[in-house]
Image: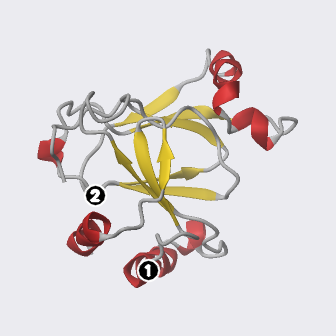
Amino acid sequence: ALEGLRRWCFESTMWFGQRAGYLAAFMQDAFNAPLVVQLTEELRDALPSILGEHQLMNMWAFKYANNESDWPIQGTAVHADIAAVNVNLWLTDDEANEDPDGGGLIVYHKQAPSDWAFSDYNSLGQVPKIQAYLADSDRLVVPHRQNRVVMFNSNLFHETQLPRFRSGYT
């Protein structure tokens, strides 16, 4: 499954989205191969107490910059999502990661406040407000590892660690 996903992501022309520091592919635009849907259903079957009642509503893939000459290097900014569960899976070889303690995900132990609108907790313009809110929060740092899955409550604030992958990585 891992090699099939890597090959599909590498060969596909689905990378229509662009963000600061990375390319994006979204379910509604082409990130919806049968293998991805199969993995989703197998995860639901394997983890019924976590995923069983929830339907897949959205999914996406990000490809971060290789080096400073590609794009400004930054990860996905701190935010929370509208969903029950986030599932993150890293496909890139560990050897491509120049920082073995980085390139992964930071998950904060605080959820988005119920009185905040979506635009308050999922917008680049609100990052300073979010950072102030999280100033006293514990956090879990999960370094990048190929084939690692990280699952968590989508309402928890999270962000990508600074990606530092070698130039030319696949």
The quadrant holding residue 21 is top left
Disc 2 from disc 1: Cα separation? 18 Å
**Residue 91's disc number:** 2
Kindly check if marks 2 and 1 are in contact, taking CB atoms under 8 A apart as contact. no
- Residue 144, percent from left and from top: 29, 43
Residue 110 vs residue 71, the one in the foreground: 71
Q: Residue at x 77, y 43 (%)?
A: 118
Local crowd size for mark 2, using a 10 Å CA cut-off: few (<14), some (14–19), many (≥20):
some
Residue depicted at x 67% and y 45% = 155
- Report the mark closest to the observer, 2 or 1: 2
Taking 101 as reference, is 108 left or right? Answer: right
> In the rendering, which numbered label is found on residue 42?
1
At which x and y percent is residue 129?
A: 71, 20
Amino acid at circle 2: Leu
Q: Quadrant of the N terminus?
A: bottom left
Q: Is residue 170 above or below residue 117?
A: below
In the picture as drawn, the residue positioned furthest to the right comes out as 115
Give coordinates of residue 74: x percent, y percent.
41, 30
The percent position of residue 57, horizontal first and vertical second, equals 64, 69
User: Residue 162's image quarter?
Assistant: top left
First-in-chain label (2 vs 1) = 1
Q: Colour mode?
A: secondary structure
User: How many numbered callouts?
Assistant: 2
Q: Secondary structure at mark 1?
A: helix
